[in-house]
C-alpha cells in the first residue's frame, strides 16, 4: 500500500486517494482539494502517479484532419465552424476518401501513430457514414490507429464504425454540467453522455475531454474533471484544450486563463484518470514552451501534431520536433 493513500491534502484536511489507483468515485470536494494544493505538491503527485502508469519520456502523437469543414448547425460558442457565427470559415463538402488517405500517409511519415478525422456535423447521416467508413478502412490499412469525431452517434452508427475498424471516437463533455448551458444550447449534456454510451457499447475506445479558458470558474474546471473521472469507464484519451479565441465567435474576447491554472487542470486530470492518456490539445500555438513543458511534467503525454487543428493554428511539425528534442521526449510507439 502506498504511503500517500487517502493522505489529507495539506491545509484542507480532505482525504484524497493519491495512490494512483484507477477509481471512479471522485467527489467535487476531493478534486477541489487537488486544485487547491500548493503547486509543487500538485505537480509532484501528478508526476509520481504518471510514472506508475506510463514511461514519462514518451508522448503519443496524433494528427487531426478536418474531413468536412464549417457550416455546422450546432452553436458551440467557441467554434468557428458553427453556422451561427461569422468567423470566416467557409462551409465545405466532405473530402474524398482518396485525399483523406493521402493525408494519413503523410501524417504517418511525419511520425503520427493515430489519425483523427473530424467532421463539423450535428450527427452524421447514414450516407455520410458510408463514406467515413471507407476512409477508416483505408487509414487503418496504413497501420495507423483510427479516430473520428463526427458529432452525435446512434448505437447502430457506432457499431458500423467499429466494424469498419475505428479504434477511437472523440466526443467531448466540453465543461462542467453547470456551465454547459453558457456554451451550447443545441444539444444537452445528456445527449453527449448518450453518444459516449453508444461508443462504449460498440467496443470503440473513448476520447473525451473538455476546454478551459471559456470564462468558467475553477469550480467548473473541478466539475469537468469530476464528470470525466466518474464516467462508467475512464476515457482512454482525455484531451484538455485551452480556448483559442477566434474572431466572430461569442468567446472571441475575454480574459485568457492563467497558464498555471491550465497546468493545474492537466495535473488534476492526470491524478483522477491515472491510466488515461492526457492530451495537451488546442491552444498550444499560443502557449510558451515553458508552459508546455510544465504540462508534460504534470502528466500530459499526448499532443496533436501538424500545422492546423481543424481550423485553428497549431505549432508546425518542426517546432514540435524541436521542443520534444529539447525536452528529451520521444514519440510513443
Ligand atoms: S464544436 Fe463541433 S458540433 Fe460544435 S459547432 Fe463546432 S463543429 Fe459543430
Image: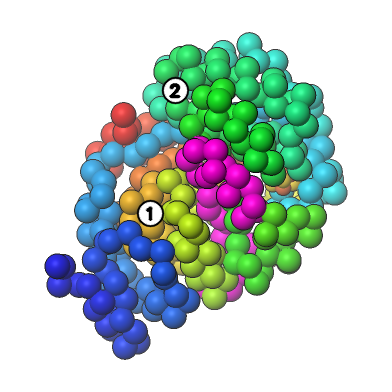
State whether residue 259 is above or below residue 324.
below
Specify whether residue 196 is painted magenta: yes
Q: Give the range drawn in magenta.
A: 192-218
Residue 185 x, y percent position in the rendering = 79, 60
How far is mark 1 from mark 2, CA to CA?
26 Å
Residue 282 x, y percent position in the rendering = 55, 46
Mark 2 surroundings: few (<14), some (14-19) or many (≥20) residues within 10 A: many
Which residue does the image show at 34% across and 84% down from the upper left? 14
Q: Is 214 or 227 nearer to us in this picture?
A: 227
Left or right of residue 33: residue 120 = right
State whether residue 157 is above or below residue 276.
above
Residue 210 makes an appearance in the image: yes
Q: In which quarter of the image is residue 111?
A: top left
Residue mark closest to the camera, 1 vs 2: 2
Residue 253 makes an appearance in the image: no
Mark 1 close to ligand 1, CB under 8 Å: no
Label 1, secondary structure: give it: helix
Q: Which mark is residue 295?
A: 1
**Circle 2 residue:** 144
Specify whether residue 24 is painted magenta: no
Residue 4 x, y percent position in the rendering = 20, 72
State whether residue 241 is above or below residue 318.
below
Left or right of residue 21: residue 244 = right
Which residue does the image show at 74% across and 34% down from the upper left? 124
Q: Residue 256 carries which label?
A: none
Q: Is 303 or 272 nearer to us in this picture?
A: 272
Q: Is 84 or 313 nearer to us in this picture?
A: 84
Mark 1 surroundings: few (<14), some (14-19) or many (≥20) residues within 10 A: many
State whether residue 22 is above or below residue 30.
above
Label 2, secondary structure: give it: loop
Which residue does the image show at 37% across and 73% down from the upper left? 34
Left or right of residue 332: residue 291 = right
Amino acid at each position: 500500500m502506498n504511503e500517500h493513500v487517502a493522505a489529507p491534502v495539506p491545509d484542507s484536511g480532505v482525504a484524497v486517494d493519491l495512490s494512483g489507483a484507477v477509481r471512479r468515485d471522485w467527489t467535487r470536494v476531493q478534486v477541489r482539494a487537488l486544485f487547491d494544493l500548493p503547486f509543487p505538491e500538485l505537480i509532484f503527485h501528478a508526476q509520481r502517479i504518471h510514472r506508475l502508469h506510463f514511461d514519462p519520456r514518451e508522448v503519443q502523437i496524433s494528427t487531426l484532419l478536418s474531413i468536412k469543414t464549417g457550416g455546422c448547425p450546432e452553436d458551440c460558442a467557441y467554434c468557428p465552424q458553427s453556422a451561427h457565427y461569422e468567423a470566416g470559415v467557409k462551409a465545405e463538402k466532405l473530402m474524398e476518401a482518396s485525399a483523406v488517405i493521402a493525408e494519413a500517409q503523410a501524417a504517418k511519415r511525419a511520425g503520427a501513430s493515430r489519425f483523427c478525422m473530424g467532421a463539423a456535423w450535428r450527427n452524421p447521416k447514414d450516407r455520410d457514414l458510408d463514406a467515413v467508413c471507407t476512409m477508416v478502412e483505408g487509414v487503418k490499412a496504413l497501420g495507423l490507429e483510427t479516430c473520428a469525431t463526427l458529432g452525435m452517434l446512434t448505437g447502430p452508427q457506432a457499431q458500423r464504425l467499429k466494424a469498419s475498424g475505428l479504434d477511437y471516437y472523440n466526443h467531448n463533455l466540453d465543461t462542467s454540467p453547470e456551465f454547459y448551458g453558457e456554451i451550447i444550447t443545441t444539444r444537452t449534456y445528456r445527449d453527449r453522455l448518450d453518444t459516449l454510451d453508444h461508443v462504449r457499447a460498440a467496443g470503440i475506445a473513448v476520447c473525451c475531454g473538455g476546454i478551459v479558458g471559456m470564462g468558467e470558474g475553477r469550480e467548473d474546471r473541478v466539475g469537468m474533471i469530476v464528470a470525466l473521472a466518474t464516467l462508467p469507464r475512464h476515457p482512454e484519451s482525455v484531451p484538455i484544450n485551452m480556448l483559442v479565441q477566434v474572431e466572430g465567435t461569442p468567446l472571441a474576447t475575454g480574459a485568457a486563463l492563467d497558464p498555471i491554472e491550465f497546468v493545474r487542470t492537466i495535473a488534476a486530470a492526470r491524478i483522477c484518470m491515472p491510466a488515461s492518456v492526457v492530451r495537451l490539445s488546442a491552444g498550444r500555438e499560443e502557449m510558451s514552451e515553458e508552459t508546455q513543458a510544465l504540462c508534460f511534467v504534470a502528466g500530459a503525454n499526448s499532443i496533436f501534431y501538424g500545422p492546423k487543428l481543424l481550423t485553428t493554428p497549431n505549432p508546425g511539425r518542426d517546432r514540435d520536433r524541436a521542443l520534444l528534442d529539447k525536452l528529451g521526449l520521444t514519440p510513443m510507439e
